[in-house]
Image (spheres, rainbow, N blue to C red):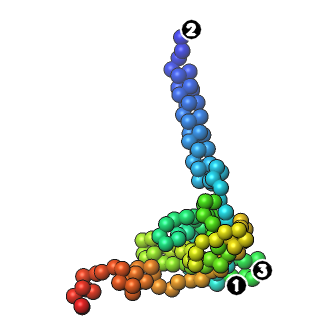
Amino acid sequence: MSTSKSDNFRSGLLYLLVFAVLVGAFLYLQKNDWFTNNNTFKVVYDDVSGLSKGAAVNVRGVKIGKIKDMYVNPDNPNTIVAEIKIKGKYDIPKDAVAAIASGGLIEGNFIILEMKGYCSGDYCATDGDYLKGRKIFRSVHARMLMKRQINFPWMILRK
């Protein structure tokens, strides 16, 4: 039995369609972290200017999570709630502070988790808990300059 060009075209189109659906499903599952253990915490801010969904959540420069969602607080419409998703392998103390920092023009804003130390047992925040929030008004680069962690040529000339 011979196959015509139209049969070959239909078979090829079907294979391409199945391949596209499989790739789309893979990307969707990977994006939503279905197979990883994460904890979600809520942080209330007065202002989240420059912060966006998907921005990084860092601890001392290491990305440990991202911003899952942001919305107007239903209890107080003058504040914003940011939901942050943290990888499950990290224990976050209940007294941790989620500070909004500016990474500059290219990086945009992100969250830095400030922690005093490790936690264990009841001292650790659990999924759905609220963390304290605050905003850092100067950029991370400005803080590094103040601590002399970055040297620019004009700073060397001043010395």
The amino acid pointed to by label 3 is Asp
Q: Outermost residue, right direction?
A: 75
The amino acid pointed to by label 2 is Met
Q: Nearer the viewer, mark 3 or mark 2?
A: 3
Q: Is residue 94 left or right of residue 137?
A: right
Seen in the picture, residue 17 relative to 111 is either above or below; the reply is above
Query: How far apart are the two marked residues, 1 and 2, measured between alpha carbons?
Result: 73 Å
Q: What residue is shown at x 67% (from left), y 65% (from top)? A: 40
Residue 69 quadrant: bottom right
Q: Earlier in the sequence, mark 1 or mark 2?
A: 2
Query: How far apart are the two marked residues, 3 and 1, measured between alpha carbons?
Result: 9 Å
Residue 1 position within the rendered picture, expressed as x and y whole percent measured from the top left: 56, 8
Q: Nearer the viewer, mark 1 or mark 2?
A: 1
Disc 2 target residue: 1
Q: Is residue 145 left or right of residue 85?
A: left
Q: Outermost residue, left direction?
A: 157
The amino acid pointed to by label 1 is Asn
Residue 103 position within the rendered picture, expressed as x and y whole percent measured from the top left: 45, 75
Q: Earlier in the sequence, mark 3 or mark 2?
A: 2
Disc 1 target residue: 78
Q: Outermost residue, bottom direction?
A: 158
Say the numbered circle drawn on residue 148: none
Q: Is residue 153 left or right of residue 89?
A: left
Disc 3 target residue: 75
Q: What residue is shown at x 53% (from left), y 17% (from top)? A: 4
Q: What residue is shown at x 60% (from left), y 83% (from top)? A: 134
Seen in the picture, residue 156 relative to 2 is either above or below; the reply is below
| Helix, strand or loop at mark 1 | loop
